[in-house]
Image (cartoon, grey):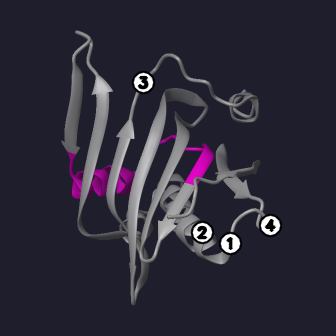
Amino acid sequence: MKPNLIIPFILLPILTFGQLTHINPTKIDSTQKEVLNVILELFDGMREGDSSKVHSVFRENPKLHTSFTNKDGKPILKKDDLQKFLNAVGTPHDKVWDEPIWNVQINIDGNLANVWTDYAFYAGIDFSHCGVDAFMLNKDERGWKIFHLTDTRRRIDCDIPDEIKYNRE
């Protein structure tokens, strides 16, 4: 397995308040670019409110989970449903849903890849939560697709880069 690669980035504003993590192409190889493009397509679809675009990056029947600590301090692993997520993305909302990422690490072995990245979620300029996205992808004749996504969520102890925070004001 290839070692973790921490990928440098430059954030570029897109859409109304959207952000895209721009990856320095000299630091990652073509296979890593293919994997990363799947993740970026997901976030583009979220910003655009395009559930078809979001759906296109997933395998059939993917596993989705969220790991968090509830108000009582109890650790929770909640199973999520892709269709509910797609419905939420595709339902018109007044604010752009944006999930800028940083500290992207991509590991690949053959047709298996994982991506681990910090993120912050915003509805328009309003901060909602932060955490880590952990993606599992595999490649077949149709290309790389996500078959498992688990995220963490918290509202405190978020070390969000200034370029992301200050672009919201």
Q: Residues within 10 Å of mark 2 (few under 14, many from 20)?
A: some
Indicate the amino acid at tag 1: Asp
Q: Nearer the viewer, mark 3 or mark 4?
A: 4
> Residue at coordinates 49% horizontally, 16% vertically from top-left?
156
State if disc 2 and disc 1 touch (CB < 8 Å): yes
Indicate the amino acid at tag 3: Arg
Numbered disc 2: secondary structure: helix
Seen in the image, is 151 located left or right of residue 100?
Answer: left
* Disc 3/disc 4 C-alpha distance (Å): 33 Å
The correct choice, above or below, for 23 with respect to 30 in the image is above
Q: Earlier in the sequence, mark 4 or mark 2?
A: 4
Q: Which residue is mark 3?
A: 154
Magenta residues span 80-105
Indicate the amino acid at tag 2: Gln
Give me the disc on residue 26.
Answer: 4
Q: Earlier in the sequence, mark 3 or mark 4?
A: 4
Instruction: State the image coordinates of residue 155 (x, y, percent, origin top left).
Output: 46, 20
* Disc 3/disc 2 C-alpha distance (Å): 28 Å
Residue 26 visible to the viewer: yes
Q: Residues within 10 Å of mark 1 (few under 14, many from 20)?
A: few
State if disc 4 and disc 3 touch (CB < 8 Å): no
Q: Residues within 10 Å of mark 3 (few under 14, many from 20)?
A: some
Q: Earlier in the sequence, mark 3 or mark 1?
A: 1
Give me the disc on residue 29.
Answer: 1
Instruction: State the image coordinates of residue 141 (x, y, percent, origin top left).
Output: 39, 90
> Residue at coordinates 69% horizontally, 52% vertically from top-left?
7
